Every structure is written in structure tokens, then in C-alpha cells.
Amino acid sequence: MGVAGSKLEKALGDQFPEGERYFGLENFGNTCYCNSVLQALYFCVPFREQLLEYYSNNKNQGEADENILTCLAELFSQISSQKKKTGVIAPKRFVHRVRRENENFRGYMHQDAHEFLNFLLNELVDILEKESQKVTNVPQTSSVEGAVNGPSNGQINGVKKEPLVTWVHKNFQGILTNETRCLRCETVTARDETFLDLSLDIEQNSSITSCLKNFSSTETLNAEDKFFCDKCRSLQEAQKRMKIKKPPHILVIHLKRFKYMEQLNRHKNYPTRRVPLELKLSNTVEDADSEYSLFAVVVHVGSGPNHGHYVSLVKSHNHWLYFDDENVEMVDESAIQTFFGSAQEYSSSNDHGYILFYERLTSDDN
């Protein structure tokens, strides 16, 4: 990326952010899904800072202790410590580790960037939880308590144990509350669940705001879907809705763009209208809106879910950058909407924003 790198440096000139590095990532056959997600995560500054701190505290570990977390931390450190401002890095060690840990990513078939992001974040959480257990000498939980989500809410020596909150959780985890109201006795049952990203159904030319409203719309449970009310002790008609109880610091939105159409025997792509650079999250339990700013987008290029290419757009120090594996270019903010396949009605673009990364602007740290 010598020519492209020097072109980028020339374009930024005196505005090149001090201490920042803009490096493309080499593609190992089909690893664009991985590269695009890694660029989005690298420019998620709170996550990057925590990962670099982890690396500085654990860089002397031997090869026997190598895992996906140590490989990712090493890769981010390698990028951030480069003497050159731009260039290309081969994430060979990290990709090798991913393929070793998960057979789904071993071949050269097209992979899903959202599935990879989910795998990566959950793997990081598992490793951090296990390391925390070692440090605090917490005994392994029994099979009854279950190890699906790491430490449970059980008791140790009669003391209630809170679930471990890692720095991955602190960045990405939010809480949803599922409210169900019995239409006979009016009793409301609420059940909380955590999330690391929100998957939104997309309708033709719908906006992100309307998709979020649909996510929290009220659904009536009747006929075969009746709700068992504990108070009535019987199946009853009910109303159900999902609300965001605790908005995350980093809001990741996965757009479910492709729907299989049986009559067409193929997938149909649903583009969105304008994607807001600033987003107000209003479907929360609290009345106050949570405000977010878009800082990264993983873009799927292609007409179907089982083939194509991934690139990413990131915002760094008020500049937007376009990452396509080894290539890095500046892009004007006004051009961002063209990557959602709907900037113009007649557009035949196959570029479709797939995963959106928003950072919270106003948050209650308590």
C-alpha cells in the first residue's frame, strides 16, 4: 500500500492525527469478513485502549498461554506501535488462531461478518472470565450452575456471587427487558436479558429509527400463542413488548437485510433509507433518550448473503476512512449514505451497510 499510503498521508497533510495509525490488513483468501470487523473494533477507541492495556500487562506470557485474546491484543499493539503512519499488516497469527478455534472459519467459503463478530466477542468474554476465576481462586461452578455464560448468580460459602462484568461487557453489553401484560388481570411480567448487539428486521426502504420502533412494538399473544399467567394460573391473551432497560456504551446494530423469498427461490435484499450519523435511542425503559454517534460501518458488497465482499468505513478524529483489506482511503462524510444501497432510488449499487457501530454520547456511568 505504498502509493495508497502516501496518498492518504498527503490527503490528510497537517491534519494527520498525532499518534494515530491507518493500516490495511492483508487478505488470506477469504478473510475480508474478519478484516472489516477488526478495523471497526480497532477504531472503537474504548475497546482498543482496554485491549492495549491488557497486552501491556500480559505480553510476557508464553506460547502455551496463547489464545484469541492474546493474538488480538498483539495485533492491535503491532498496529498502534508502527513507526510509519500508514501501511499494510498481515494478521496471520490472529487468523490462524481463529481457524484453529472455530472450524466454521477454516475453509475458503464466504463467511458472515456478523457471525464472526459474535464469535469473537463471546470468545473474549469467556477467556476474561476464566482468567478472572484463576486470579481470584474462585472454584469452578458445578454443572447445575452451568458454565454457558461463565460465572452464574449462585452462592459461594453462603455469599451471593454477582456475575462477572468484563471490559468487553462494559463496552458492548446492554440489557433488554421483555414485558408481558396479561389482558385478563393486567399483571405485568418482566424478564431481563443481556445483549452485545441488536439484530433488526429491515423492511423495504425503512429507516433505522422505524426499525428500532418496530423492534419495541407491542405484539398480541392469542390463539395458539397465549401466555401462561402465573396469577391467573392459566393461558391468557396478553400483550408483549421488548424495551431497552440499559443502553450499552457501544451500540452495535446488525441489519437483517436478506430475506429468502420462496416464490422467487432466492434471497431479496432490503435497502434502508438514510442511516443517521447521530441516533437517539427512544425505546428505553427510562424516559430520557440516549444519544449515539456513528463511528464505524461494516459494509457487505454483493447481491446475496452467501457471496460477496466486506469493507468497512470508520470515523477517526472527525475524518471518515474506507478500509478494503490492504487499501485505505479517505472518504467524504457526504458519501457515507451511498454505502447503504438507497441514497438514490435508481442506484444499482450492491454496497449495503450491514453492521453499524454507535458510541454513546450521553451516558449515566452509575
Image (tube, helix red, strand yellow):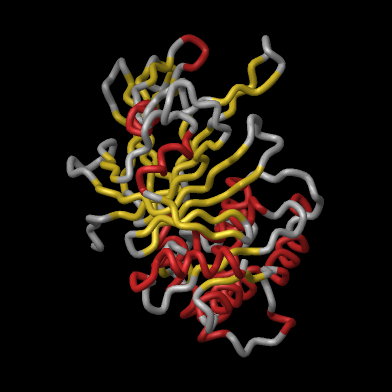
- Residue sitting at 55 percent across and 58 percent down? 121
Q: Looking at the image, can residue 42 be seen?
A: yes
- Residue sitting at 65 percent across and 34 percent down? 305
Give the residue at the far bottom of this rendering.
60
Q: 177 or 304, which is in the foreground?
A: 304
Image coordinates of residue 40 in percent, x first then y, are 50, 57
285 up-or-down from 136: above or below: above
Image quarter (top left, top right, bottom left or bottom right) of the C terminus: bottom left
The answer to which quarter of the image holds residue 232 is: top left
> In the drawing, does residue 165 fall left or right of residue 138?
left
Q: Looking at the image, can residue 160 be seen?
A: no
Q: 197 or 40, which is in the foreground?
A: 40
357 up-or-down from 20: above or below: above
- Residue sitting at 75 percent across and 59 percent down? 28
- Residue sitting at 46 percent across and 70 percent down? 9
Image coordinates of residue 103 in percent, x first then y, are 78, 54
121 up-or-down from 54: above or below: above
Image coordinates of residue 187 in percent, x first then y, are 28, 27
Image coordinates of residue 342 in percent, x first then y, are 45, 29
> In the drawing, does residue 90 fall left or right of residue 235?
right
> In the drawing, does residue 142 fall left or right of residue 336?
right
Image quarter (top left, top right, bottom left or bottom right) of the N terminus: bottom right
